[in-house]
Amino acid sequence: MEFNTPVTIALSKGRIYKQSLPLLEYAGIVPRDDPETSRKLILETSQRNVKLVIIRATDVPTYVQYGAADLGVAGKDVLLEHGGGGLYEPLDLRIARCRMMVAGVPGANLEADRLRVATKYVRTAQSYFAAQGKQVEIIKLYGSMELAPLVGLADLIVDLVESGNTLKANGLVPLQHICDISSRLIVNKAAWKMKHLVVSGLLEAFREAAQSS
Ligand code: PRT
Ligand code: MG
């Protein structure tokens, strides 16, 4: 496809970047640097008009919402917490897949009242337990949630689980499945209108690439 208009795509390092590469390549976009080794935050690509910005996973919706990037790739977990304002979410890219789970020590009593739940995913946890009619106290953490039940900070955690190895290594077990998670293409609402040709071209290329993988 042709890129007659400048476009900026926001991505996070790590699994989202790695798993986005084949999708970008399908659209004819090959980065000129590797974010894992380069310290550059803006990557030029094989397309003069296409730039990648490399930011924290949780910041991707914010950059796209404010138009600092036209498009981005973000996990559904991150989008649920962000709330999705100012964004379209037109495509499930089916990459970086995992599950949002409630976990705890084996035999943890889920029926106890005033359970304490440690998580980075405050909104998701709140609405999940509210929908179940359960009163819980949410404790916001920024990482290493698995530690919380081991040191008495919380009864349960809400976290992402892929292989289950992290839970297992810490003597925890998955208890309840909240939802499946994958990464989504997100688009700034103004860019959707003003750059419709290039944005819809990219959307179609990513759709084809995601279906064929
Ligand atoms: O790591 P950093 O603090 O920089 O940011 P981040 O964790 O937000 O970014 P990153 O790159 O780790 O994750 C980006 C996105 O990948 C997330 O928003 C999810 O949508 C998706 N994803 C897919 C995952 C996982 N799988 C995953 N397994 N994100 C995190 N994990 C972690 C999980 O939190 C837990 O600590 O991996 C651990 C569990 O993995 P298993 O295989 O041991 O079960
Ligand atoms: Mg991480």
Image (cartoon, rainbow, N blue to C red):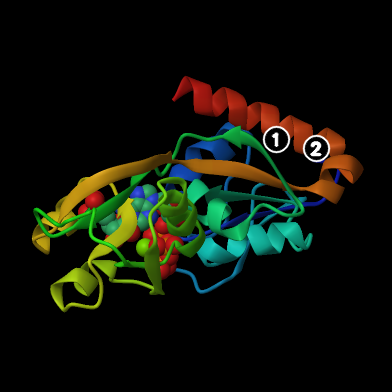
Residue 113 occupies quadrant: bottom left
Is residue 108 toward the left or the right of residue 17 in the image?
left
Disc 1 on helix, strand or loop?
helix
Q: Residues within 10 Å of mark 1 (few under 14, many from 20)?
A: many
Where residue 39 appears, as percent x and y from the top left, is: 51, 74
Is residue 113 toward the left or the right of residue 19 in the image?
left
Q: For this rendering, which residue is in front, 45 or 208?
A: 208
Residue 54 visible in this rendered orientation of the protein: no
Residue 145 occupies quadrant: bottom left
Where residue 189 appears, as percent x and y from the top left, is: 81, 47
What's the residue at 29%, 52% (across, down)?
Answer: 102
Which residue is labeled 1 in the image? 202
Which residue is labeled 2 in the image? 198
- Residue type at the position of mark 2: Val
Tag 1 near tag 2, CB within 8 Å:
yes
Q: Quadrant for ligand 1?
A: bottom left
Q: For this rendering, which residue is in front, 34 or 19?
A: 19
Residue 51 visible in this rendered orientation of the protein: yes
Where residue 108 appears, as percent x and y from the top left, is: 14, 57
What's the residue at 44%, 25% (across, down)?
Answer: 213
Picture layout, residue 135 above or below residue 23: below
- Residue type at the position of mark 1: Leu
Disc 2 on helix, strand or loop?
helix
Residue at the farthest right position: 194
Tell me: is circle 2 under 8 Å from ligand 1: no
